[in-house]
C-alpha cells in the first residue's frame, strides 16, 4: 500500500525523533516516517528533520545535506514558536532531501516519505 499508508517506522530511537510509535518489520509496504517536532521542542526543527531522514532511510549523516535544499536557520525560524511562546499553527513546507519527500507542517508534524 504505497502512498495511502499512515504507518510509521522507527529504526532507532533517540531524543530527536522518537515518534513514540512502534517499529514495523515489513519494509515492503512502509508509509511515511512521522515525527512530531513539538514533542522534541528542545531540538531545532532542522536537526529533527535530518534525524528523521536518517532514520527513515538508514543513510549515513554525510549522505544527508539539508543545506543543499533549504537553509536550516530559515527552517527553524519559520516553525519557531511565536514571541509569546505559543506554537505556530498552520503552514506547510515541502522539499526533497536524500531521496525522500519531506513535509514539515506548522501543526508539529514532520513526514518523511522515501521515494
Image (tube, grey):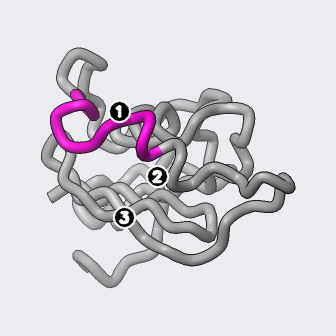
Q: Nearer the viewer, mark 1 or mark 2?
A: 1
Disc 1 packing (10 Å; few <14; some 14–19; many ≥20) = many
Residue at 29 percent across and 31 percent down: it is 58
Disc 3 packing (10 Å; few <14; some 14–19; many ≥20) = few
Q: Quadrant of the N terminus?
A: bottom left
Residue at 34 percent across and 40 percent down: it is 53
> In this orientation, which residue lies closer to the viewer: 39 or 7?
39
Judged by its main secondary structure, the magenta piece is helix
Query: In the rendered structure, which segment of residues is drawn in magenta?
Result: 65-75
Direction top: furthest residue: 62
Residue at 26 percent across and 19 percent down: it is 60
Direction bottom: furthest residue: 4
* Residue 41 included in the magenta stretch of the image: no
Q: Secondary structure at mark 1?
A: helix
Q: Nearer the viewer, mark 3 or mark 2?
A: 3
Left/right placement of residue 50 relative to residue 76 reads left
**In the rendering, at what x and y percent does residue 51 appear?**
44, 33
> In this orientation, which residue lies closer to the viewer: 6 or 46?
46
Q: Which mark is residue 93?
A: 3
Q: Secondary structure at mark 2?
A: loop
Residue at 29 percent across and 60 percent down: it is 113
Label 1 or label 2, whichever comes before in sequence order? 2
Q: Secondary structure at mark 3?
A: strand
> In this orientation, which residue lies closer to the viewer: 15 or 43?
43
Residue carrying label 1? 54
Residues at marks 1 and 2 touching, judged by CB atoms closer than 8 Å? no
**In the rendering, at what x and y percent does residue 46 appear?**
46, 37
Query: Is 115 placed above or below 89 here?
Result: above
**In the rendering, at what x and y percent does residue 14 appear?**
62, 28
Label 3 or label 1, whichever comes before in sequence order? 1
Q: Which mark is residue 9?
A: 2
Amino acid at each position: 500500500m504505497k502512498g495511502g499508508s499512515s504507518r510509521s517506522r522507527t529504526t532507532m530511537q533517540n531524543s530527536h525523533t522518537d515518534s513514540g510509535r512502534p517499529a514495523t518489520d515489513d519494509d515492503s509496504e512502509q508509509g511515511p516516517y512521522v515525527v512530531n517536532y513539538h514533542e522534541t521542542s528542545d531540538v531545532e526543527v532542522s536537526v529533527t528533520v535530518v534525524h528523521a531522514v536518517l532514520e527513515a532511510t538508514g543513510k549515513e549523516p554525510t549522505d544527508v545535506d539539508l543545506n543543499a535544499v533549504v537553509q536550516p536557520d530559515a527552517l527553524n525560524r519559520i516553525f519557531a514558536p511565536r514571541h509569546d511562546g505559543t506554537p505556530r499553527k498552520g503552514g506547510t513546507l515541502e522539499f526533497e532531501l536524500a531521496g525522500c519527500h519531506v513535509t514539515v507542517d506548522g501543526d508539529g508534524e514532520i513526514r518523511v516519505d522515501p521515494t
